[in-house]
Amino acid sequence: MPLLKLDAVSRDFDVSRPWLNRVLEHEPRRTLRAVDGVSFSVEPGETLALVGESGSGKSTVARLIVGLYTPTEGSVRFSGRRMQMIFQDPYASLNPRWRVRDIVAEPIRVLHTKNRVDELLVQVGLSPDDGEKYPHEFSGGQRQRISIARALAGEPDFLVCDEPTSALDVSVQAQILNLMTDLQSRLGLTYLFISHNLAVVSQVADRVGVMYCGRIVELARAVDLFTRPRHPYTRMLLDAVPDLSMSGKPRTPVAGEVPNPLAPPPGCTFHPRCPHANERCRTEVPAVINDVACHAVQEGRI
Amino acid sequence: MILQVEGLKVEFPTRRGALTALDSISFEIAPGEVLGVVGESGAGKSITGLAVIGLLEPPGRIAGGQVRLEGRRIDNLPHEAMRRLRGRKIGVIFQDPLTSLNPLYSIGRQLEETILTHLPMTKAQAKARALALLREVGIPAPEARYANYPHQFSGGMRQRVVIALALAAEPQLLIADEPTTALDVSIQAQVIALLKRLAAERGAAVMLITHDMGVIAETANRVAVMYAGRIVEVGAVRDVIHSPQHPYTVGLMGSIPRIAAKRSRLVQIEGAMPRLNAIPPGCAFNPRCPRQFDRCLVERPNLMAAGTSQAACWLHAPA
């Protein structure tokens, strides 16, 4: 049985102008569909990654899962014990007036023992003495370790990680990614890992979902996605990643931008940027078939 | 050489004595060349850029060394002369395009004004040049967007406008500080391609400051790797990426995640870069270095030949 199951989840936000403006200027209410019919499940012990550019709806999905937003349509089912979230900015997610010991102990305040906090700090590569310090005494990477220790305090079996390393330097990012991998195998954790960085995702994910304009356009095992991407958007994203090996392999130049979410294009939202788009793509929203939402793939055109 | 920097030293005076933010930085950039300056936060890469263009935030000051543009010393120029030089001879592109654009003026007006300030042109000529620049940086239908304000553009389009502004007076030197960091990957690829093309076509020298080795690999000819206010390795991009010589560069390259079908463990450099007030004696990297030995603890290495590059590391000292 999957640990987490999302079934056709959508979320709308009301972005209408104030009431008086609407009345005076005869404007209708406007809604923005940030997440549109997203379905996937996460199996115990695996890492599912969601990738996409800004505005693709990946962070909204994370917030829907942990219950910070309620879905407008669809359902989120969690059959695990407890879930926790790790955020991008370790500066903003730690109370600067609290000692690290109290920050880490907050979720377990009732049964808080000093030993347990020490154990948690050691588990994330800090020392028990660090508990007496304040967050400003730590570097970005160490602060993210503190966030992880706090997330682990309640013994969750599922962690939602929203861009956990995006604010960190690359050498520190490597430390945190390795730590997360170690904790996963030691504690049997399940991760939902959200990132805009495909290279990071390829290092941590078992399966990857690619999001565009609020929809999942492709969901595949990481091995398959990175060796044989199917959706034209996935191919474009992979082509856009700078080539560190300097192999000079030919690449398709990337064109266009993510459309305005208030006025998404009809049909497949990727069609204005897609080299394979035809009339059908401009009018008909592609359904997700075999984990990819693309008419051209379905028709065998690409 | 368009830009020559020699022994540049930048200090920030504090109550407890001066903090050295940059120490004996030397490099040169030739016409048409892109020099990448890479490093993690706090390495001093942005301060290097700011020192070159004379925009160091006080109390920071240049405490030693020279900066020469086309052979002429510019680090000791008075404020007003430096201001004229920026824009005319040096174009600057910052990470956040909104800080470089005035929200109250249309982009057409900003471009025209920049052109008229620096070049002897009539208003009509300036407008024609502004439109040509917008077309060149890939703004679709520039005539239609001419009267638009910065907030009406997307992030990627704004950065293109900033690039057009930086190029307005045909500068010989272009300094780009994290020009693609605020952009999505697909837009980043477009802006990188644009920068590369412009540098090649115009023969300008480009100093590209970034934390992203991938961007360097795509764009630069040579790269300088910075650590704790010093250049620890410099060489051709291909050499530095494929056979890094300094242990810090080796660790840095290993810690960069790459797209791979199989998950693997990343190389990890233990610890973090020291703060400016706690730079260790000897080589600044010695507490984190897997190959440190006695000499590293006491004596600071300068750049020396290492393979086909140069590295500031005693491992490469001639025996």
Image: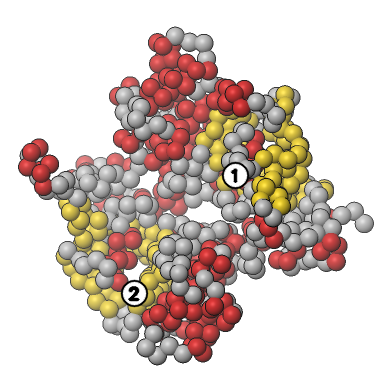
Q: Residue at x 53, y 85 (%)?
A: A118
Disc sitting over residue A44 in the figure = none
Eyeballing the image, is B314 above or below B117?
A: below
- Chain at tag 2: A
Q: Is residue B147 left or right of residue A25?
A: right
Q: Nearer the viewer, mark 2 or mark 1?
A: 1
| Residue B250 seen | no
- The foreground one among B218 and A99 is A99
- Residue shown at the point (77%, 66%) measured from the top left: B291
Crowd class of label 2 (few under 14; some 14 to 19; many from 20; radius 10 Å):
many
Q: Residue at x 46, y 35 (%)?
A: B100
Disc 2 secondary structure class: strand
- On residue B46, the disc is 1
Residue bearing the label numbered 2: A42
Residue B297 percent coordinates (x, y): 81, 64
* Position of residue A217 measured from the top left corner of the image (x, y, whole percent): 31, 57
In the image shown, does A112 or B193 lie closer to the viewer? A112
